[in-house]
Amino acid sequence: MMQEPAESVVHGSGFGAGEQAAGKAHPRDLPATDRLLREAAVQQLLADHGHTLVAAEARRLLDDCRQQVLAGQLDLAQAALPALAAQLQARVQQVLRPRMQAVLNLTGTVIHTNLGRSLLAEPALQHMLAMMSGPNNLEYDLGSGGRGDRDSMIEELLCQITGAEAATVVNNNAAAVLLTLAAMARGREVIVSRGELVEIGGAFRMPDVMESAGARLVEVGTTNRTHPQDYERAISGNTALLMKVHTSNYQVQGFTRSVSEAEMAQIAHRHGLPMATDLGSGSLVDLAQYGLPREPLPQEMLVAGCDVVTFSGDKLLGGPQAGLIVGSKEAVGRIRKFPMKRALRMSKLPLAALEATLRLYLQPEHLTRDLPTLRMLTRPVAEIRGLAARLQPLLIEAVAPRFGVEIVELQGQIGSGSLPVDRLPSAGLAMAPLEKKGAGRALDALASALRQLPLPVIGRIADDRLLLDLRCLEQEAAFVSQLPALQEQLA
Ligand SMILES: *Cc1c(COP(=O)(O)O)cnc(C)c1O
């Protein structure tokens, strides 16, 4: 039970006799916590959510009200039991609301790291739900009845798809790179081209990862040009590994020279050394067949002679967060046995999703239908334009009279560091304030209103317009059903 504030506090805060503003609450108008909890409406809250949460929120509410009273800011009606019960209910709902929320990604960036990267395919969702609802054979061999290996199901699929001798998986590609370097080159030297010492974002810088792995970085070449002799000359008795990093998030153009994986593998093998490639996005199918910009495939890296190839699960592959490692039996075996692997291993949750996603690759003809990332990347612009035409009149109604809405051609991108230079022709809707005065503020208000919707809509602001790229809008009905709420928010 909370103490009522002492009279001295009340007097000290400007509530002397006769000083109370008309209609404002006095500290003694506030009920004790117990009294509020006995209120009929609150009894229902207690039944639904239990005493711990409801009582804690009731105390917080009354504390806040007391502060407002002392500041002379609480109306008498707000201090009444029915009003407090309603506020308490709102608070309980607010504290119980999900923090992670579904949103509509209309930014034009298909694989958006801030918005969760790749969306899982329906079979992956189903498999995850089925496997997480009960026990499964995660580390149990159903044939022998003995202990199994959690990576074995993934390994079999990855080897079939990529032609690799061996494969293993970890938490993400950053972990795959770290583990590869630690297992293959701890206390020794790794030779990398200066043009490939990239920062991937989120404080993942190649030189730092190298240091974390306990390997010594030997930089060769220059930012724009690296030659085979640069690697040859850098090899010493301390060299453990030659490494190539796919510079996925930028491009060096003009007077450039880099050494191909095949050339590097030859140099490495001639000196009895292994060669590793960090591919980053690592699409498992040739994107050129869909008219998209080409990304190197892990399959090709293996054919070129790489002993280890690492790539992400939630970029172009279209699966859950994961770091995939494929390569030779010898190299992958060393990586798998390295103790750090235990700390970086995948949980059963994404493993189930990854396994189901990889199974989709056994039927590559259906990928653009079944895999959301590829489905959205290959969505025909004509279809996106059609969607824009259907939505335009509805959106005009929702944002009138302050904003106009036009159908526009847009340039999107794949995202997540993949193919940064190439643009993805798309279409969408551009909203612009009709009044030039205060246009910037009006746009911010519109963007904010879109973000406050039950299913928040994330667009982008460019050239004084709010752009909604519709390439990734597959929930047309959900978008339309929110337009009345948007209209209300703008009113
Ligand atoms: C994205 C990327 C990484 C990091 O992969 P995560 O799965 O996000 O950990 C590492 N290297 C390259 C080249 C990348 O593009």
Image: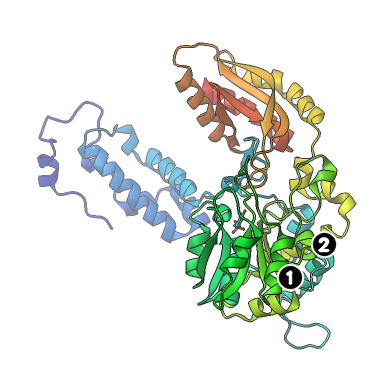
On the rendering, which quadrant does ligand 1 occupy?
Answer: bottom right
Q: Is residue 314 above or below residue 490?
A: below
Foreground residue, 69 or 479?
479
- Residue 411's spot in the image, x, y percent? 68, 30
**Mark 1 or 2, nearer chain start:** 1
Confirm if mark 1 falls within 8 A of ligand 1. Answer: no
Residue pointed to by mark 1: 327
- Residue 206's spot in the image, x, y percent? 53, 59
Q: Is residue 27 visible?
A: yes
Lateral position of residue 268 relative to residue 96, left or right: right
**Amino acid identity at mark 2:** Arg
Q: For the residues marked 1 and 2, what is the alpha-carbon distance in whole angstroms?
A: 20 Å
Q: How is the image coloured?
A: rainbow
Q: Is residue 35 visible?
A: no
**Amino acid identity at mark 1:** Gly
Residue pointed to by mark 2: 359
Question: Which residue is rendered at x = 61% and y = 64% of the image?
Answer: 231
Foreground residue, 185 or 162?
185
Whether tag 1 and tag 2 are in contact, CB under 8 A, the answer is: no
